[in-house]
Image (spheres, grey):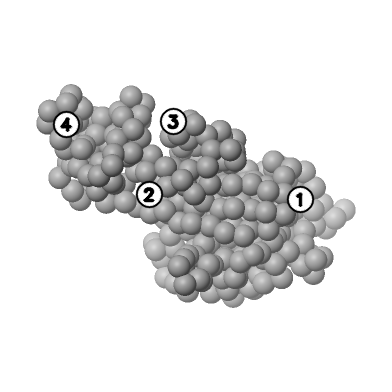
Amino acid sequence: MKEAATSRRLIAIDWGTSNFRAFLVDRDSGACLGSRRSDAGLRSMTSREYPYYCAAQVDDWRDDAQVPVYLAGMVGARRGWSEAPQLELPVDASALARHVVAAPGMANAWIVPGVKVVRDAHVDVMRGEEVQAFGALALAGRQDALCCLPGTHSKWATLTGGRLVDFTTMMTGELYHAVCFHTLPGEPAREASREGGEVDVVAFRQGVQVAGHPAGLLHALFEARSRYLYAGLEGEQVGSFLSGVMIGHEVRTQVALHGTDTPVMVVGSCALNHLYRLAIDFMGGTVREIDSDHATLAGICALASRHQQGGD
């Protein structure tokens, strides 16, 4: 009886450069039965430590390795636990399942491959977000979608007929951090960050609007300084303004590519989803928000089902 119960469970892990997230999942319902999170990203330890850390986090869920583990994200990069391939587009969940890689040092544990675009005019890579995109598709009950997956390196992914056919990476989150903490326009934001605080929606919307300045992104970012000096932008608003500029610029470029007729599935945390909704609404688009944790679980469940069936 115990073996039958555990065989209907799996462990989904999203392990990136900065964070570790593990979920115990019921395969049949997709329900999360338990979760663990930490700041123990890949850069915080050596490759030899990965299997030991992972085992310490999830072994009490595994019932002597009967419960399989599926790991997605940068854990499969060259600098991660073990390199998993990055598949050429187009791909579907079955293709990912066929190319999972056994995680060295842990029985019944599998690293999910990433995807890549290699063309003359466009070269791009993805690890982890492809699982969320397929999960979002499953949660929405759709075969076609335009997904926005916000984060340090935001992804905009096009899915057609249940296959991921194209994507673009935007360095929005990383650029935001760099500007806030390493530039003159971001100086007031550094002072404000010590006190915490939520996003100022008024300043964020100003940034979204300024992102459309005909002089482009480089000028729009500097307006954080000019407006702080002469247009009433308070120091505690500068970070929100810069966030609006960068997210606004990201959204504008994607609207130019895809138009506003296609609804955007925004797959992220509650806070980021809200900001992207504000920017997309400003541009006249429509949004469906999906929690990134739910998308990860749904994507891993879909992949695991195909893996157990031989990838079909």
Label 2 sits on residue: 172
Does residue 261 appear left or right of residue 221 in this picture? right
Q: Residue at x 64, y 65 (%)?
A: 90
Graded by Cα atoms within 10 Å as few (under 14), some (14 to 19) or many (20 or more), the crowding at tag 1 reads many
Q: Amino acid at mark 2?
A: Thr
Q: Position of residue 35 (x, y in %)?
A: 59, 46
Q: Nearer the viewer, residue 11 or 139?
A: 139
Q: Position of residue 249 (x, y in %)?
A: 37, 43
Task: Mark 2 and mark 3 in contact? Answer it, CB < 8 Å.
Answer: no
- Marks 2 and 3, how far apart at CA: 18 Å
Disc 2 or 3, which lies upstream in sequence? 2
Q: Quadrant of residue 306?
A: bottom right
Label 4 sits on residue: 228
Q: Residue at x 62, y 60 (%)?
A: 165
- Marks 1 and 3, how far apart at CA: 39 Å
Q: Amino acid at mark 1?
A: Arg
Disc 4 or 3, which lies upstream in sequence? 4
Q: Position of residue 130 (x, y in %)?
A: 59, 57
Graded by Cα atoms within 10 Å as few (under 14), some (14 to 19) or many (20 or more), the crowding at tag 4 reads some
- Marks 1 and 4, how far apart at CA: 52 Å
Disc 2 or 4, which lies upstream in sequence? 2
Q: Which label sits on residue 27?
A: 1
Q: Which label sits on residue 282?
A: 3
Local SS, label 4:
helix
Graded by Cα atoms within 10 Å as few (under 14), some (14 to 19) or many (20 or more), the crowding at tag 3 reads some
Graded by Cα atoms within 10 Å as few (under 14), some (14 to 19) or many (20 or more), the crowding at tag 2 reads many
Q: Nearer the viewer, residue 111 or 92?
A: 92
Q: Is residue 192 in view?
A: yes
Q: Amino acid at mark 4?
A: Tyr
Q: Quadrant of residue 104?
A: bottom right
